[in-house]
Amino acid sequence: MLTGSELGRAALYLSNMNLQLVKAAGVRRMQAGRGVGARLPGTLQGAPVQLVELSRSIPGGKAERVTPLGYRTARRSLPRLLSSMDSADPRLVVAQMIVDAAERLGAVPGSNFAGSDSKGEISDGGATTRVKHAARLRDFEAMANGWPLDRRKARANRVPRVALAVRRRTANRYSVKVFDALCLACVDCLSMDEILRRHGWPARTSYRNKVRDAVLKTLDLIALEMGYAHAAKKTI
C-alpha cells in the first residue's frame, strides 16, 4: 500500500505527464517547427492550421504570390466541405464570416479586475459585442432560410429549410435543418457522416449528398443575398 508521500509523487508525475501530452498536442495542432514563418504558440485553444502558399488574382488572369518564396502561411484548417474551394469563392467567404461571428460570440472578453473596458469606461462584460455577433448570426440564419431580415417582423411563423425531413417517426431520428447543418460543417468542422449520425440518420451516400448539396446551395444563396458574385460552379 502506498504511503502519503508516494501518492503525492505519483500524482505529481501524472500531472507532469498530462501537461507534456497537452503541450505536444498543441505543438502538432499549430504545426510548430514545420516550415519557415511565424506561428502562434502551441495551444489546444487555437484552431488547427495547415501550411499553404497563398496567391491572389491580378489583372490579366494571372496569379501573384502572397506568401514569400520559400515560406508557408499558417492558415486555419478548413473543413473538408470547404477545403477544395478557391480562396476567392464567395461561398468560402460567407462560410468564414459565419465562423467568425460564431467564434466571436463565444469568445468575447469580459471586463478587467478594475471593472472597466479597454477604453477606460465602465464595461458591460462584453454584452454589447455579444449582441452584435448574435445579430449577425441571426441575419445569416434568415438569409439561409429565405426569411426577411427585418427583425421587427414576427418570427413565430418562420419555417426553417430542411435538408433531410423525417417522413416516418423513428426513435432518435430528427430532421436535418439546413442552417444547423451549415454551422455544424463550417463552425464545428463535422463531416457529413458525423452530421447525419448526430441527427440519427445512417451515413448513406444519398443522405450525405443531400445534406452536402443543401449546405453548398445555402452558402451560394447567402453570397448572392450579400451581393457577391455567383459562386464557382465547379463540383466540390
Image: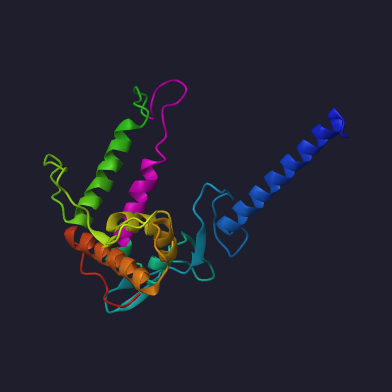
Q: Residue furthest top?
A: 114
Closer to us: 165 or 185? 165
Indicate the quadrant containing the C terminus: top left, top right, bottom left or bottom right: bottom left
Percent x, y of residue 58: 30, 73
Of 223 and 119, the residue lying toward us: 223
Q: Nearer the viewer, residue 141 or 53?
A: 141
Residue 44 is a magenta residue: no
In the image, the segment drawn in magenta is 93-118
Residue drawn 39% across the image and 74% down it: 205
Write the residue at 35% across / 58% down.
Answer: 170
State the count of labels.
Answer: 0
Give 206 or 224, whichever is nearer the viewer: 206
Q: Is residue 37 left or right of residue 100?
A: right
Res. 30 image quadrant: bottom right
Q: Is residue 149 above or below residue 198?
A: above
Residue at the spot x=35%, y=54% of the render? 183
Q: Is residue 88 visible?
A: no
Where is residue 226, by image quadrant?
bottom left
Q: Is residue 112 magenta?
A: yes
Left or right of residue 205, residue 48 in this image: right
Image coordinates of residue 191 in percent, x first then y, are: 43, 63
Q: x%, y% of residue 131? A: 28, 36
Q: Look at the image and tell me in which quarter the N terminus lies.
A: top right
Is residue 118 visible to us here?
Answer: yes
